[in-house]
Every structure is written in structure tokens, then in C-alpha cells.
Image (spheres, rainbow, N blue to C red):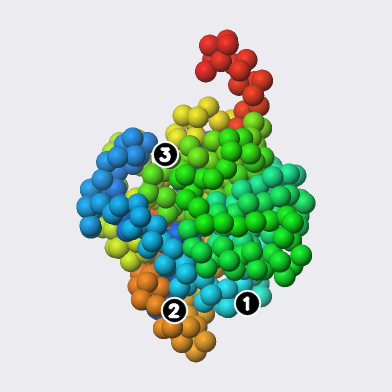
Amino acid sequence: MSFTAATPIHTSSYAPSSLHSNRFDPTIQSPIPLRRSFSSFTPRRTSPLLAAAATTTKTVPDQMDSDRLQKGIAEFYDESSGLWESVWGEHMHHGFYDPDSSVSLSDHRAAQIRMIDETLRFAGVEAAMAAVDVGCGIGGSSRYLARKFGAKCRGITLSPVQAKRAQAIAAAEGLSDKVSFEVADALNQPFSDGEFDLVWSMESGEHMPDKSKFVSELVRVAAPGATIIIVTWCHRDLGPSEDSLQPWEDKLLQKICDGFYLPAWCSTADYVKLLESHNLQDIKTADWSQNVAPFWPAVIRSALTWKGFTSLLRSGWKTIKGALVMPLMIEGFNKDLIKFAIITCRKPHMKLHTAKYQKGVL
């Protein structure tokens, strides 16, 4: 079944090299998950500006305290990161492909690098001096940005295993003077205001239980003039006459959240509204769902190999539980419910921001 790209909000003139139909194979079973951080919150049925980030429907359990949430995230990645690295390498995110591509494992790893490059191109980033990698995994993006731009990069994750492994790889590659990693909460980052000229979140935003606080922290640590990049999973934008997702959509997302320990989903439009509330500039979005499609069947196939299957069994119940709902993710993409979105913007320069404020524009 093919999917159709939704009309983007605040679209830019950028267009990936090929955005046309793609197909998933819905018959493949027993995948391994791609997620970067998990929680046990459940999805909201609606998301008009996240209803002030407060409205929920089903809660199973009703509320999880933050300590328990963070513990679950850390344990998942403590268990599963070694499996991912052994099969897919250092980049714990999707690849970017020409739709309908026929690709090998080596092509997939190249596509993960291409995802970083396409993201930088979309955002118009040609240089960076200081970057933060929010939800850094084992540090693949941080090390790439350090090599590409000579930037100093700081990565944060809730997984002690990931932070330790990220630092070990950096040392082995001679990058210890350029990159560093630590265990920290993306909703309460251990950085000063305005510290970074590139704020990078590659597939971590979907796991944040408070999207408003998440965006606020990205804006806080961004320097004046900095670029903020969010590449994330969203649900579809609501139509003009809708105030919620359809019941079957809510049910499907509920099942995915139960399997992946995910918090509430939001739409690309919700992110745009949150960014607009901070008076950010040059907000651009695009739907790259078609360009990530080849990655899903490949991840599933990797789990069906002897190495993948035995490694999955050894990785622990949390990883297996996530693997069992991967076909539902494919279903969500095929039914145009789930979107792979990129959202970028720029924090105003201080003088310009002050001038607008004095003129009453802000």
C-alpha cells in the first residue's frame, strides 16, 4: 500500500530529490524497534496546540511519575542499544532514500548518513561551532557534526549505557576533544541559556511527555541566530473541521504506545504552533514519510536473520515487546496516520528581537 505525503505547513522551497509513492510490505513480521526513548504515557485523542499540553484520554496507567518514566527509558536503551549497533551501526535513526529503492545493508548505513546531510540541507546549515544533540543515542550524529563542521558537540541521553558507549567510540576515533556525552533529561537540560548555535533533535521529540516543555528547552539553550532542528514522528495534521483523530486512529496509536512505552503523539501543526509561540523565525516543515519507507522492511528483515533473532531474544522483554508492534507502525504509515516530519526554525538575533519588541511587533 502506498502512502501520500500530506500538504506541509509553512513549506519551504526545498524538495528532496524524489518524493513519489512508496510501498511497505505488510506481511513481514517480528521486527525490532527504531525508537530512541520510551515512556509509559499514553496518547491523547486530540492535539489542538496539545490542548495546552494537558488533555488526555486513556491513561494506562493513569499517570507515571517522572522517575519511573525515566527509568523505563534508560532500561530500554541500556538493553537494546548494543543490538542496534551490532546490526545497524552507530546511527540510531532512519535512513533517507529515493522511494522504491532496492538497497542492501551497506546502502542503509549510507542512507543514515544521507538523512543527516538532507536534514542539514533542508535547514540551511552550512557551519556550526557548538551543537547539542538531544537524545543522542550512542553519539552518531554528534561525531558526524564534529567531523563535518569542526563543532564542539554535547550529547544527552537518559541511558548510562549509551552515554558510556558514545564516549568510548569518540575516544577511539580521536574526537574526545570535540564531543562529550552525559546522562541528562531533555526537559531539564544541564546547559546555559544560549549556549549552542545548532540545536539538533534526531528522532527524540516523539518520546517527550511534555512537548511544550521540550520545545521551550530547545529554544532556551539556542543562541541568538541559532538553528533548531526537530526530526520526529508525528500523527497527521487535523483537518479544518476536526477537533480530534478518528476513533480507529486513536486506537491504533494507543496500541503502539502500549508496546513502545510512548507518551502522547502530536502533529506537525502542533509543533509549528509551539515554535510560533516563541516568536521563532523561518519555520519550515516537510513530510519525509516516503523517503524513510525502505528502512522499515529492512529492519524487520534484519530481525528475521539468525543473528538478529537470537540477539533480539537476548536483549530483553522491553525490546521484544517493542518488536511485536512494529507492524502497527507500518500500518500507521500506510494509512496516512503516522508522519515522519522535519521541522526547522531559527532563533532571532537579539538586536532584531529587541527592536521588534520596542516597536510593539512582539
Q: Earlier in the sequence, mark 1 or mark 2?
A: 1
Q: Earlier in the sequence, mark 2 or mark 3?
A: 3
Residue underneath mark 1: 104
Measured in 3D between alpha carbons, the distance from the residue under mark 3 to the one under mark 1, in whole angstroms, is 39 Å
Q: Residue 185 in the image: state x and y as whole percent.
A: 47, 50
Where 171 sits versus 106, above or below? above
**Side of 193 where 269 appears, left or right:** left
Residue underneath mark 3: 212
Q: Are marks 3 and 1 in contact (CB under 8 Å)?
A: no
Amino acid carrying mark 3 in the image: Ser
Amino acid carrying mark 2 in the image: Ser
- Identify the residue shown where x is 44% and y is 52%: 206
Q: Residue 287 in the image: state x and y as whole percent.
A: 52, 50
Q: Image quarter for residue 281?
A: top right
**Side of 286 where 265 appears, left or right:** left
- Mark number, residue 168: none
- Identify the residue shown where x is 54% and y is 45%: 190
Q: Residue 130 in the image: state x and y as whole percent.
A: 69, 45
Q: Nearer the viewer, residue 77 or 308?
A: 77
Amino acid carrying mark 1 in the image: Ser
Q: Residue 147 in the image: state x and y as whole percent.
A: 76, 57
Residue underneath mark 2: 315
- Identify the residue shown where x is 53% and y is 41%: 218
Measured in 3D between alpha carbons, the distance from the residue under mark 2 to the one under mark 3, in whole angstroms, is 33 Å
- Identify the residue shown where x is 23% and y is 58%: 60
Measured in 3D between alpha carbons, the distance from the residue under mark 1 to the one under mark 2, in whole angstroms, is 24 Å
